[in-house]
Image (cartoon, grey):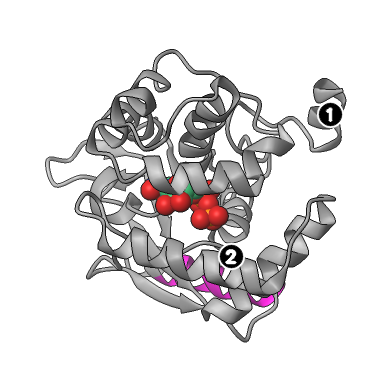
Amino acid sequence: MAAKRRQRSGARLAIGYPPCQSARLNRNFGTRDGSRKGFVIAVDGPAASGKGTIARALAKHFGLPHMDTGLLYRAVALKIWRWGGDPNIEFEALRACDNFGFDPDDEELRSEPVSRIASKISSYASVRDALLQRQRDFAAQEGGAVLDGRDIGTVIAPEADVKLFVTASAEVRAQRRVRELLERGMPGHYDDVLLDIRARDERDATREIAPLLQAPDADLLDTSDLTADQAIAEAIRLVEHKLANA
Ligand code: CDP
């Protein structure tokens, strides 16, 4: 079943999508010491802002591998949920970070209980530390990468070539999340989802470790009044502008 789903969604790698064959990015980016490095795009933003859609589209457009870092937190959360562990106990959350593998197409990763646990455990410094290297290694791979999350431009890849901070009003984000849940056959009630999004924004923005922040050198992309296609087009324009001026 999972294998079938994977087939339907194309050859997805463990996390995200492989680069497309028609890679349009054939430049090498120089570092100050003259060595070459990959091109890294950091996409950050709050829940349901559209950052995942934009990051996937950028990865496809520029022929780069993509990591949805939220999935790492969700995978740890799912493990805790299945164990019947207590997400309020940091040590239990840390234990769930050991040797975890996951199927990115597992529908439960995106369920509301798992989202709530992910939001809780992502505020633990020990959990963030345990997941840090995996993300940095992904960003450091030859050729570069696109990563999306909350702290990519600030903590994971502060040297990223392009940083986008994708946002939208809480109401628009709640509408999108409800639509997404219903499309997945899961229950979604607008008022509950809006409350949850606001609570999650508050937790993301005020946590001590790696809070959700727009990096000073990030471009802001507000998608409140944009369709997905318009938001993607604008993101590509912003990246191409950076490329042209690199
Ligand atoms: O878009 P949404 O917030 O629903 O989910 P996500 O991006 O899949 O992230 C799941 C949870 O992990 C969220 O509660 C984030 O706060 C957290 N997260 C994080 O703390 N740092 C990241 N780099 C990515 C996600």
Say whether mark 2 is within 8 Å of ligand 1.
no
**Mark 1 or mark 2, which is nearer the start of the sequence?**
1
Magenta residues span 229-241
Side of 1 where 154 appears, left or right: left
Could you tell me which residue is drawn at 62 percent across and 79 percent down?
172
Q: Amino acid at mark 1?
A: Gln
Which of the two discs, 2 and 1, sits closer to the camera?
Answer: 2
Total number of numbered discs in the rendering: 2
Quarter of the image where one finds residue 141: top left
Name the outermost residue toward the top: 99
Task: Judge whether residue 239 is colored magenta.
Answer: yes
Residue under numbered circle 2:
50
Quarter of the image where one finds residue 226: bottom right
Could you tell me which residue is drawn at 66 percent across and 77 percent down?
230
Name the outermost residue toward the bottom: 225
Residue under numbered circle 1:
7
Could you tell me which residue is drawn at 81 percent across and 59 percent down?
182
Q: Which residue is more in the foreground, 80 or 10?
A: 80
Q: Position of residue 86 (x, y in %)?
A: 43, 30
Q: Amino acid at mark 2?
A: Gly
Quarter placement of the N terminus: top right
Q: Which residue is more in the foreground, 156 or 186?
A: 186
CA distance for labels 2 and 1:
24 Å
Side of 145 where 216 appears, left or right: left
Task: Judge whether residue 240 is colored magenta.
Answer: yes
For residue 127, above or below residue 111:
above
